[in-house]
Amino acid sequence: MAEEQEVGISVIANGATKLLRFTLQASHLEKLNSERLDLQRQADGGFLIIPGTEGFKPQKGALENGAMYIQTINLGKFALTKKTRKRINLRPSFENGNMVIPPPPKEWCDASGDFGTAKGRRSDAAPRPTNIKSDIEELQAQIERAKELFAQIEARTGIKITLDRDLRLVVAGR
């Protein structure tokens, strides 16, 4: 089964009002199977989007890789800091015909750290806190695992596989 697409969440300013913006994919709406949706905040801080009759109707927008649907909701309904925030992407799950969105990171909810106030226009990039040293170590470990697999393939088939300097596969015949 194809990997489920992520939902984008951001807090934007509309004059003095702050709005919670959800960016949904067409596949999400197909699974929810309703033109109108209701949004609820869960006890764990996540969100629940359920098919409804009186809720919001997502507005169609455009995105580089296909259609997206945007809905903005008054932030006052939710217990979140009233500061604009960069967009984050969260992977939803579907239970009993409802879409369950996991809780955003605490730093995002508080608009602190790497998730602080967005300057100017909203960024479509999904910010995430990074630790460069651990990212490099993880990449090195994955490369070593790949090299071990390449050695096993060569031993069994005689086909030599290596990585070039841009981490692309290079296959050499027998």
Image (cartoon, rainbow, N blue to C red):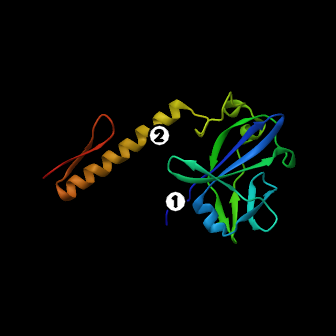
Q: Residue furthest bottom?
A: 96
Q: Amino acid at mark 1?
A: Glu
Residue farthest left in this picture: 174
* Above or below, comparing residue 119 to residue 162 in the picture: above
Which residue lies under the disc numbered 1? 3
Which of disc 1 and disc 2 is earlier in sequence? 1
* Mark 1 burial class by Cα count in 10 Å: few <14, some 14-19, many 20+: few
Foreground mark, 2 or 1? 1
Q: Position of residue 61 (x, y in %)?
A: 61, 50
Dot 2 crowding, Cα within 10 Å, few <14, some 14–19, many 20+: few
Determine the secondary structure under disc 1.
loop
Q: Is residue 62 left or right of residue 45?
A: left
Counting from the top left corner in percent of width and height, residue 32 is at: 67, 67
Q: Quadrant of residue 126?
A: top right
Secondary-structure class at tag 2: helix
Residue pictured at 61% horizontal, 67% vertical: 30
Residue where numbered disc 2 is placed: 138
Left or right position of 125 against 21: left
Horizontal side, residue 152 vs residue 6: left or right: left
Real-space CA distance between mark 2 and mark 1, rounded to the nearest whole angstrom: 22 Å
Q: Which amino acid type is shown beneath numbered disc 2? A: Glu
The image quarter in which residue 88 lies: top right
Q: What residue sits 61% from the left and 54% below the top?
A: 91
Is residue 137 or residue 13 the one in the foreground? Answer: 13
Across and down, in percent, residue 90 comes to 63, 50
In the image, what residue occupies the spot 21% across and 54% down? 155
